[in-house]
Structure formats: structure tokens, C-alpha cells
Amino acid sequence: MSYALPESEIGKDKSMIQVKNLRKHFGEKVAVDGISFNIEKGKITGLLGPNGAGKTTTMRIMAGYFSDTFGSVSYDGLDMNSHAISIKRRLGYLSEQAPLYTDMNVREFLHFCADARGIPERQKGIAIQKVLELCELKTVIYIPIHHLSKGFKQRVALAGTLVHDPEYIILDEPSSGLDPNQILMIRNLIRDLGKDKTILISTHILQEVTEICDQVIILSEGKIVMNASVNELGVTNRIFFRSEVPIQKVKEIFFGTGMKDIEILQSNEDGTFNYSIDSLGQGGQSVFKVLAKNSYSAHEIRPFIRSIDDIFSDLTRNH
């Protein structure tokens, strides 16, 4: 059951969220500096960046909280500035500071959210029951929110965000401050929602991105410094190899091969060394041939994949 915008009102371009040349100033400070990106329907996109990079500002603009901006945000071809009411019917936004009325119990709060979203009375009970089950809140229905743990409060806020069955979901740090079990629960819920929703999530937990996201966008100082699919993340022309070739010899044997920039990663207890090298597209077979020609073994050869932690650190180091 959905309480989203009727199909007849949706714009012709049904492919994505489109952000074009988005810019936002706070006084003389540029919080978001001309960023553009697309999010495909039915995908989970992770928005990363250090504190102050512009993540929350970007999300608030996309949710329609800031109007005095440059650039545009559109959902399925509908511009947020001119179709804000229509878009917000299809949008769920959870801010980092979860908005809750803590004197209410959980059911009262969800009734309040359902009323605010205009869910018809005959459908309200079904909608509330659905999010109670989805967010695993049935055991705390009648407990005042101020008595709940932070993990439960976050789930209540998420249930309120989802009660109108939004097509697009924007989540700002939904796992912030939660314990490992609570983080796992939220992560699994987002993964399940991503099967038929379009989700933008910001997080400081880099592992979360590789586990649940299809796309990652990294911001630094209000600019996009990376926009890639998770499958492409960390893919390079470099080759990892483990061999007994000595550190002082390795550059010599690869000299003149066209391969370059050898990096010593680690020495191992078995007398081998871990290296990476820029193969310039020649691949692992070429590395193997060079080692064999010089009478060295190749204990392991594979593409060198950089971790999300290394990528994030390199791209945001000067922030």
C-alpha cells in the first residue's frame, strides 16, 4: 500500500533523482559548491565526507528544507522548487537529530506522523502496523518515547519517516550513536528497503557503504571528489603480487618493462614480500612473466583493490 503521488501527476522522466550545479552559502561560507549527480531509481547511494563537507546541507536541500539555493534538484523530472508539495508526498527524510515528541508513546507518535502525512483514516491502522513490524517496535508500542533507549528511539523516528510508504528515502546518519547490534538491525532494514525504494544515506561507518550501497559519492569542502559504483570502488591498474624477490632487487627486474611505481606493502614471516605495481593495463600475466624470467616465484598475483578507508583518507586528507 502506498500513499505516494498518483501516477498521473508524475513527470515524464522517471529514471532518477537529478542534482544539478547545487550551491549553498551560509554568509561567506560555501557549504555546497556546485555539485551535480544522479541517483538511479531502486538504488542505495552512500554520501560520505568529513564533518563540514556539506553532506547534511545537501540532504536538507534535497528534502526541500532550504529554498534559497543555486542549482536544482528534481525527482522524476519534477523540480523541487516548483513541485515541493507533490515531491514531499513521495519522500521520507530522517535528519541526524531524530525528530521525536518524547512525551508521546510509540503508537501515539506514529498516529501523529500518519495524520501529518494525510493518510486516510481507513488506511492509517494498516500503515502504522506495517512500520511497527518493519522497524521491530511491536514490543514497545505503549511505552513513552522518553523511556526508550537510543536504538529504539532511532527506530521510532525511522518508522515515522516510513509511515506514508515513501518512494524516495533520505537518511542522515541513521546509525549514529548506536551499538553494534542496533547498527546491524538498521543496516539490514535499509538493505531490505532498498529492494524497491530509492535511498540516499550518509554515514561515518565506511564498511556500511560497501555492504549495502550501490553507489558512493564522497564530498570534501562542498565539492564531489568521487562518484562511483561500489563495484568500481578501489579498482585500479595496479597488480598485487607476493614473491621472494628482495626489496633491493624488485625495481631492477621490472625496469624497462613498461610497468612502474612499485610499492612495498609488507614483509612476511615466510621470507616473501607483498608488492603492488602499476601494470599500465598489462595485467597479472605480465607480472608473472617478469618474475619467472628472473627465476622468482609468484606465490600470489591478483588485481590490487584499494579499501574504502584508504580511498576516503586520500580524497579528504586536506579537508
Image (cartoon, grey):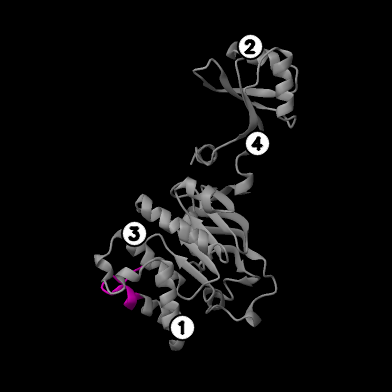
> What label sits on residue 151 in the rendered view?
3
- Mark 1 nearby-residue class (10 Å; few <14, some 14–19, many ≥20): few
- Mark 2 nearby-residue class (10 Å; few <14, some 14–19, many ≥20): few
Find the magenta span and give its range. 99-109
> What label sits on residue 249 in the rendered view?
2
Residue at coordinates 46% horizontally, 83% vertically from top-left?
Answer: 118
Q: Secondary structure at mark 3?
A: helix
Residue at coordinates 62% horizontally, 56% vertically from top-left?
Answer: 36
Give amino acid for label 1: Gly
Q: Secondary structure at mark 4?
A: strand
Give amino acid for label 3: Gly
Q: How far, Cα to Cα, is label 1 from label 3?
A: 27 Å
Badge 4 is on which residue?
A: 236
Observer able to see residue 65 = no
Mark 1 vs mark 3: which is more N-terminal?
A: 1
Residue 259: say if magenta.
no
Observer able to see residue 282 = yes
Q: Secondary structure at mark 1?
A: loop
Residue 102: say if magenta.
yes
Q: How far, Cα to Cα, is label 4 from label 2?
A: 24 Å
Mark 1 vs mark 2: which is more N-terminal?
A: 1
